[in-house]
């Protein structure tokens, strides 16, 4: 992924159940994608699309979910990918204690 853009796209689809006990019922499947370029299918088919670096919801959002709630939701389902994103694009500031003073990198 390029450093300029990072989007998280969540899509839901309904398919007939493959379970014989649930014939005639529908299954909802969820797909979470981490992309650096939005394609037409992302915009057309997504339930919600978020710009990770700008921290805002771009498309969808049927339940008026806030950005922080969305990130928590995705982190619960994709912890490894979110950890990698956070480390790559939003690293925690380095904190040092020098001569009794706390110094935060970048301040």
Image (spheres, rainbow, N blue to C red):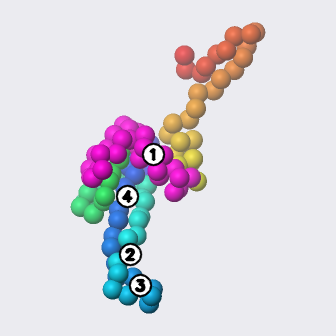
Q: Are dots 2 and 4 in contact, CB under 8 Å?
A: no
Q: CA distance from mark 4 to mark 1?
A: 11 Å
Residue position for label 2: 27
Mark 1 nearby-residue class (10 Å; few <14, some 14–19, many ≥20): some
Residue position for label 3: 22
Q: CA distance from mark 2 to mark 3?
A: 9 Å
Task: Locate residue 30, reporting x and y percent.
Answer: 41, 65
**The C terminus - image quarter:** top right
Identity of the residue drawn at 44% across and 90% down: 20
Q: Are dots 2 and 3 in contact, CB under 8 Å?
A: yes
Identity of the residue drawn at 65% across and 23% down: 95
Identity of the residue drawn at 60% across and 21% down: 105
Residue 63 colored magenta? yes
Q: Nearer the viewer, mark 3 or mark 4?
A: 3
Q: Nearer the viewer, mark 2 or mark 4?
A: 2
Mark 3 nearby-residue class (10 Å; few <14, some 14–19, many ≥20): few
Name the quadrant containing residue 35: bottom left
Residue position for label 4: 10
Residue position for label 1: 71
Q: Earlier in the sequence, mark 1 or mark 2?
A: 2
Instruction: Let me know if residue 61 appears in the view.
Output: yes
Q: Nearer the viewer, mark 1 or mark 2?
A: 2
Location of residue 35 with respect to 107 vertically, above or below: below
Q: Which residue is the extreme one toward the front?
A: 21
């Amino acid at each position: 992924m390029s450093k300029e853009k990072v989007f998280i796209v969540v899509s839901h689809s309904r398919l007939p159940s493959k379970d014989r006990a649930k014939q005639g019922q529908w299954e909802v499947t969820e797909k979470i994608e981490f992309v650096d370029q939005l394609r037409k299918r992302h915009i057309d088919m997504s339930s919600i699309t978020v710009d990770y670096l700008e921290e805002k919801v771009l498309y969808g959002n049927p339940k008026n979910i806030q950005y922080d709630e969305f990130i928590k939701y995705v982190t619960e389902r994709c912890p490894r990918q979110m950890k990698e994103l956070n480390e790559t694009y939003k690293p925690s500031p380095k904190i040092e204690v020098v001569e009794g003073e706390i110094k935060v990198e970048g301040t």
